């Protein structure tokens, strides 16, 4: 139980009000009788500033007891616990789930991008809402709870990829607190309750062939763009870069003499390259020319692309979907077309797939494409290389058949 804090009352003075101490923390003397209402000061979670809280007690002696109980309750709630949780001796040494999540998020802010951090906050808050009804402590997360979370995600209508991605975030949290290493010691009525794996406990992800943008789609898309939009999405197409790599593209990253875009971290703004893999990507001559023209009157002294407020633009995806709708490219069949008037088939990563496929068709070696995309695995790169349509390969098919038959 907490020490009795200082207790205050309010007195009117010179047309205003001030707080006056009626009991000082640590005092052993008998406090004077005084009239309610009584107040205490406390620091809310996540705040640097103290706030006043009014007590309900009518007498100072009762206010002292209420003040202690109130502070104990506030301290427990800040950790996602009840007072009973904090007083239970079996919980000693355990890390409250809320505290674990907050600490984990604080740690990743130093290495993750802005968009990734937002996603992690959302995913872990969602997991907390689910898991809090099962346990208050990260130490007590079990495979059974994770399987329940997987069922919850499936029941909420999330697809296989989303279920996997959100579960991976949770597993990262558990790994940071060393939870998984004890799972083999968990006693359970079911043998399979002792483990949890992405392979066995989540739906299989059906890998689709890369679907690059078709030439007629790009023609219509760019025709519907303003000059600013056209340069932005040609940059995506010409470099094959990821969203955040374009968001934080700076003029210092462009080597105009050699025609290169250097993808590199900018820790001062919280941007790190995925897998910490800095690289250089060649720029098409047309794109390099457009960038030179833009550099003459840049919208910002550092950033190549900024929003209306003059800061790095984090809404490239939303703006792309709006352009696709203006260009009448929406499929009108997918769920988001029906509910949000934005088509799920238009997304930034398709530019990356389109760039990789174009390089492949231009006979750029796969290992070189791997380096330009920033992949650590050639296997991943091969998934980015789009499959030609049968129609586009008719001439080659006929030649192969004629060669085989001797005609």
Image (spheres, rainbow, N blue to C red):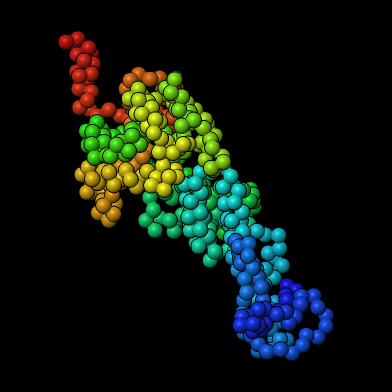
Furthest residue toward left: 407
The C terminus sits in image quarter: top left
**Residue 71 lies in quadrant:** bottom right
Q: Nearer the viewer, residue 236 or 200?
A: 236
Coordinates of residue 167 in the picture (x, y in percent): 49, 50
Q: Is residue 361 visible?
A: yes
Q: Nearer the viewer, residue 339 or 186?
A: 339
Q: Nearer the viewer, residue 392 or 35?
A: 35
Coordinates of residue 218 in the picture (x, y in percent): 26, 34
Furthest residue toward front: 14
Q: Residue at x 55, y 54 (%)?
A: 143
Q: Nearer the viewer, residue 93 or 227?
A: 227
Picture layout, residue 95 above or below residue 349: below
Coordinates of residue 297 in the picture (x, y in percent): 39, 33
Furthest residue toward right: 28
Q: Tell whether 237 sits left or right of 120.
A: left
Q: Tell whether 112 sits left or right of 85.
A: left
Q: Residue at x 23, y 49 (%)?
A: 333
Q: Residue at x 61, y 80 (%)?
A: 16
The N terminus sits in image quarter: bottom right
Picture layout, residue 326 above or below residue 136: above
Q: Residue at x 34, y 47 (%)?
A: 318
Q: Tell whether 328 sits left or right of 258.
A: left
Q: Is residue 243 visible?
A: no
């Amino acid at each position: 139980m907490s020490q009795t804090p200082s207790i205050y009352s309010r007195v009117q003075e010179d047309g205003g009000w001030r707080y006056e101490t009626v009991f000082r923390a640590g005092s052993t003397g008998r406090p004077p009788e005084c009239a309610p209402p009584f107040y205490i000061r406390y620091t809310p979670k996540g705040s640097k500033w103290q706030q006043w809280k009014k007590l309900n007690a009518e007498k100072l002696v009762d206010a002292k007891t209420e003040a202690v109980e109130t502070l104990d309750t506030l301290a427990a709630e800040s950790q996602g616990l009840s007072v009973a949780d904090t007083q239970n001796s079996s919980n000693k040494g355990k890390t409250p789930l809320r505290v674990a999540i907050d600490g984990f998020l604080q740690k990743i802010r130093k290495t993750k991008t802005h968009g990734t951090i937002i996603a992690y906050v959302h995913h872990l808050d969602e997991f907390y809402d689910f898991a809090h009804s099962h346990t208050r402590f990260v130490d007590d997360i079990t495979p059974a709870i994770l399987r329940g979370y997987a069922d919850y995600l499936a029941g909420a209508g999330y697809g296989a990829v989303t279920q996997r991605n959100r579960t991976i975030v949770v597993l990262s949290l558990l790994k940071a607190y060393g939870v998984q290493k004890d799972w083999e010691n968990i006693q359970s009525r079911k043998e399979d309750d002792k483990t949890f794996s992405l392979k066995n406990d989540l739906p299989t992800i059906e890998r689709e062939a890369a679907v690059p943008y078709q030439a007629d789609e790009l023609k219509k898309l760019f025709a519907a763009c303003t000059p600013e939009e056209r340069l932005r999405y040609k940059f995506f197409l010409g470099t094959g870069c990821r969203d955040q790599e374009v968001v934080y593209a700076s003029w210092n990253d462009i080597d105009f003499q050699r025609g290169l875009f250097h993808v590199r971290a900018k820790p001062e703004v919280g941007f790190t390259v995925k897998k910490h893999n800095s690289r250089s990507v060649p720029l098409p001559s047309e794109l390099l020319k457009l960038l030179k023209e833009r550099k003459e009157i840049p919208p910002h002294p550092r950033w190549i692309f900024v929003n209306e407020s003059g800061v790095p633009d984090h809404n490239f995806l939303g703006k792309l979907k709006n352009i696709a709708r203006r260009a009448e490219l929406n499929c009108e069949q997918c769920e988001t077309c029906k509910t949000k008037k934005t088509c799920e088939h238009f997304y930034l990563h398709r530019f990356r797939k389109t760039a990789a496929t174009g390089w492949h068709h231009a006979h750029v070696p796969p290992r070189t494409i791997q380096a330009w995309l920033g992949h650590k695995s050639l296997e991943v790169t091969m998934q980015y290389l789009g499959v030609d349509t049968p129609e586009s390969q008719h001439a080659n098919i006929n030649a192969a058949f004629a060669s085989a038959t001797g005609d």
